[in-house]
Amino acid sequence: MDLDQRAARLRFLLRDHDKKFTNIFDAVFTPEGIDVIKTPPQAPRANAFAERWVGTVRRECTDRILIVGDGHLARYTTHYNSHRPHQSLGQQPPNPPSGVTDLTAARIQRRPILGGLINEYSQAA
């Protein structure tokens, strides 16, 4: 899915005052009906969710491996949303797998992600 397909679902683009974001950058999103909102100057907490995401990706992924292509980041994003526990969600991922597993009777299978940098565990079939 590329930006053309996803742009119809977007309403806002939240960005900071970095010099790399020029008026031309904003002009790309305006015809699509996306409002560009700038965070207040020198306010790193204004976009805390994005800052948390970037920090987590850096610590868990990009600081440890060399990203070869979109596939690496796509696999990490899937892991982050489907398997990685989040404290704010009661140690559940945003998109948890369905069903409860009885760990006393279940066989557990380990699946390495990103070349073994991260491991995911699930019930073996």
Image: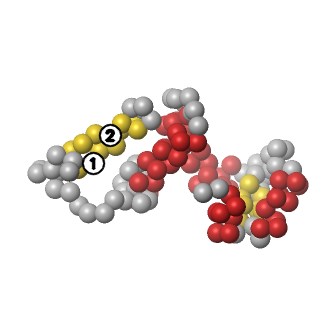
The residue located at (76%, 48%) in the rendering is 42
Residue 72 in the image, given as x and y percentages of width and height? 52, 39
Residue 61 in the image, given as x and y percentages of width and height? 51, 36
As measured in the structure, the alpha-carbon distance from the residue carrying label 2 to the one carrying label 1 is 8 Å
Residue 82 in the image, given as x and y percentages of width and height? 41, 54
The residue located at (36%, 36%) in the rendering is 112
Residue 31 in the image, given as x and y percentages of width and height? 82, 67
Q: Which residue is mark 2?
A: 111
Q: Please give left or right for residue 14 compared with residue 81 in the image.
A: right
Say what secondary structure mark 2 lies in.
Answer: strand
Q: Please give left or right for residue 5 compared with residue 26 in the image.
A: left
Query: From what the image shows, is residue 100 above or below residue 44?
Result: below
The residue located at (11%, 51%) in the rendering is 105
Question: Tell me, what colour scheme is on the image?
Answer: secondary structure
Tell me if mark 2 has few (under 14), some (14-19) or many (20+) residues whose alpha carbon lies within 10 angstroms of its own: few
Residue 26 appearing in the image = yes
Residue 48 appearing in the image = no
Q: Are marks 2 and 1 in contact (CB under 8 Å)?
A: yes
Q: Earlier in the sequence, mark 2 or mark 1?
A: 2
Tell me if mark 1 has few (under 14), some (14-19) or many (20+) residues whose alpha carbon lies within 10 angstroms of its own: some
Front residue of 43 and 102: 102
Q: Which amino acid type is marked by label 2?
A: Arg
Q: Which residue is mark 1?
A: 122
The residue located at (61%, 52%) in the rendering is 50
Badge number at residue 81:
none
Q: Quadrant of residue 34?
A: bottom right
Say what secondary structure mark 1 lies in.
Answer: strand
